[in-house]
Image: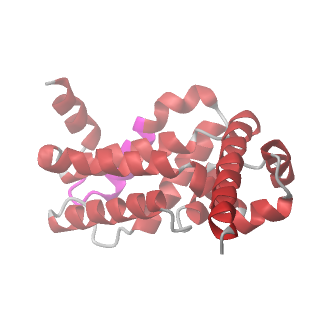
């Protein structure tokens, strides 16, 4: 019984070492870096890594947790200050920008956000909230789903990832999507620019 606290502390230490190593390597080499390399840098066995994070997506979700929590909190904090379409626009832009943190993260984001970390749950819940608000306001088509959001963010992020000079086009690409799903064809780009210029 006296060994249990030490084991728990050791497990927590290993988890922190793995997350630190993963963050560094994902930044250096991208999201597809071999997990054996992560374990080696963390100073743990590959079995220990897999016990804590059974899949690559689970590890990516864990290293992205704080950023996802922050994104969701920022989006919620906007409250009623932005029209539904503009709130969706800001959320999609920020999510697409987050996907650029690690090379190749965008390709697996659909699986990553299903991992159930607090951050993944928060951005998913916020996305659903924004869609519901958009539906109720009649701002977006009734058939738009959160899966649509993820597909579009993935496409935009991959396009930007393969051409770093296109990073400034995230806003433009999000605008194209929003104008495509809007009920009345509202030009969210011009509205948002005009609002943020005030």
Q: Nearer the viewer, residue 83 or 118?
A: 118
Residue 21 in the image, given as x and y percentages of width and height = 72, 42
Q: Position of residue 117 (x, y in %)?
A: 51, 63
Quarter of image, res 48: bottom right
Name the residue at 67% across, 61% down. Answer: 6
Residue 190 vs 8, above or below: the answer is above
What's drawn in magenta, residue-wise? 171-186
Residue extending farthest to the front is 2
Q: Quadrant of the N terminus?
A: bottom right
User: 20 or 98: nearer the eye?
Assistant: 20
Front one among 172 and 3: 3
Q: Residue at x 47, y 45 (%)?
A: 67
Magenta region, main secondary structure: helix
Q: Is residue 153 left or right of residue 188?
A: right
Asked if residue 186 shows in the view, the reply is no
Whether residue 117 is visible here, answered yes or no, is: yes
Q: Position of residue 53 (x, y in %)?
A: 69, 63
In the displayed structure, 112 sits above or below 71; it is below
Q: Residue at x 29, y 38 (%)?
A: 189
- Measuring from the top left, give residue 157's x and y in whole percent: 56, 45
Q: In which quadrant is the C terminus drawn? A: top left
């Amino acid at each position: 019984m006296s060994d249990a606290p030490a084991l728990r502390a050791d497990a927590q230490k290993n988890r922190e070492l793995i997350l630190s190593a993963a963050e560094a390597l994902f930044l250096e080499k991208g999201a597809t870096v071999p997990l054996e390399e992560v374990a080696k840098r963390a100073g743990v066995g590959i079995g220990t890594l897999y016990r804590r994070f059974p899949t690559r997506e689970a590890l990516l979700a864990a290293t992205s947790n704080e950023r996802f929590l922050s994104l969701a909190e920022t989006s919620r904090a906007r409250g009623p200050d932005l029209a539904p379409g503009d709130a969706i626009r800001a959320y999609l832009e920020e999510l697409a920008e987050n996907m650029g943190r690690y090379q190749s993260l965008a390709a697996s984001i659909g699986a990553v956000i299903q991992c159930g970390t607090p951050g993944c749950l928060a951005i998913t819940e916020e996305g659903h909230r924004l869609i519901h608000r958009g539906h109720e306001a009649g701002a977006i088509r009734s058939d738009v789903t959160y899966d649509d959001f993820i597909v579009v963010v993935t496409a935009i992020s991959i396009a930007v990832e393969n051409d770093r000079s296109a990073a400034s086009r995230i806003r433009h690409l999000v605008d194209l999507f929003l104008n495509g799903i809007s009920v009345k064809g509202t030009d969210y780009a011009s509205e948002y620019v005009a609002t943020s210029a005030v």
